[in-house]
Amino acid sequence: MIRLAAEPFEPGAELARFCAGRTETGAVASFVGIARAEGGQATALELQAYPGFTEIEIGRMADAATQRFCLADVLIVHRHGAIAPGEPIVMVACASAHRREAFQACDYLMDYLKSRAPFWKKELGPDGARWVEPTARDLEDIARWD
Amino acid sequence: MRVLLFGRLGDLAGWRERPFDPPPATLAELKRRIAAEDATLGEALDGPGVQAAVDRALVRGEATLAGAAEVAFLPPMSGG
């Protein structure tokens, strides 16, 4: 399931719902990304999405992960709009029969979300605003899966 | 036809969405029309990593816009 959230979400509650009733799944791994204050340099994030396109592109990544890691299910919740430091930005949960695939799928999906998901991130701080683009590290991370 | 600008492109142009009528026939013509009005934006649209989506599907290189309702210009994306 892919969900864009305009309001803060509760990762614990999302994970509890995702795990409920899984008598044969065996493994669920999850990751939560949280907005950083960057030592006071980031007072807020403004995350722009392209509704109707962003969900489709994230859905493609989830489908690719499902095939590659034989997942039973995927949950991706991603915030957009104004986000304060300390608030969750993204959550990924992957369900599979065994743990290794679940861990790897979370890692894979986060690398893809970092540099391929249609979001544009503006960091607001005391020195003004700047658009954040994928870093060299992000591009190295995603290249691991080629 | 509607044109959408995301991320830094919207800040650069001072608009995020506007109609283009009559609609251009191709992506190249749309970019020429934009560049004629705003050379800085025109240059940015051809900048590194900027992609275009026609009716919410990414296109590579040139694209015909016949019947298209929406063209979006997408600078490098970053989620998570």
Image: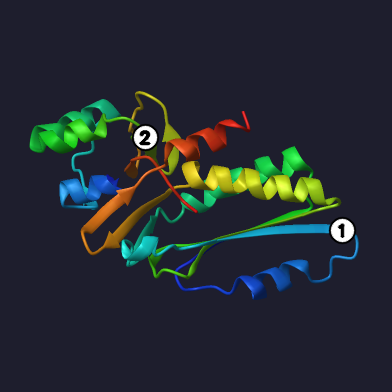
The residue positioned farthest toward the right in the image shown: A24
- The part of the image, by quadrant, that contains residue B42 is top left
Write down the chain letter for disc 2.
B
Query: Which residue matches tag 2?
Result: B51
Q: Position of residue A47 (x, y in %)?
A: 38, 59
Identify the secondary structure beneath mark 1: loop
Residue at position x 54%, y 73% in the image: A9
Q: Residues within 10 Å of mark 1 (few under 14, many from 20)?
A: some
**Residue type at mark 2?**
Gln
Q: Position of residue B39 (x, y in %)?
A: 11, 33
Residue at position x 17%, y 38% in the image: B41
Query: Which residue matches tag 1?
Result: A26
User: Is A103 on the left-hand or right-hand side of A35?
Assistant: right
Identify the secondary structure beneath mark 2: strand
Write down the chain letter for disc 1.
A
Residue at position x 47%, y 70% in the image: A86
Q: Nearer the viewer, mark 2 or mark 1?
A: 1
Residue at position x 70%, y 46% in the image: A105
Q: Residues within 10 Å of mark 2 (few under 14, many from 20)?
A: some
Mark-to-mark CA distance, 2 and 1: 40 Å
Q: Quadrant of the N terminus of chain A?
A: bottom right
Is residue A146 visible in the rendered image? The answer is yes
Q: Position of residue A26 (x, y in %)?
A: 87, 58
Q: Is residue A130 above or below residue A137?
A: below
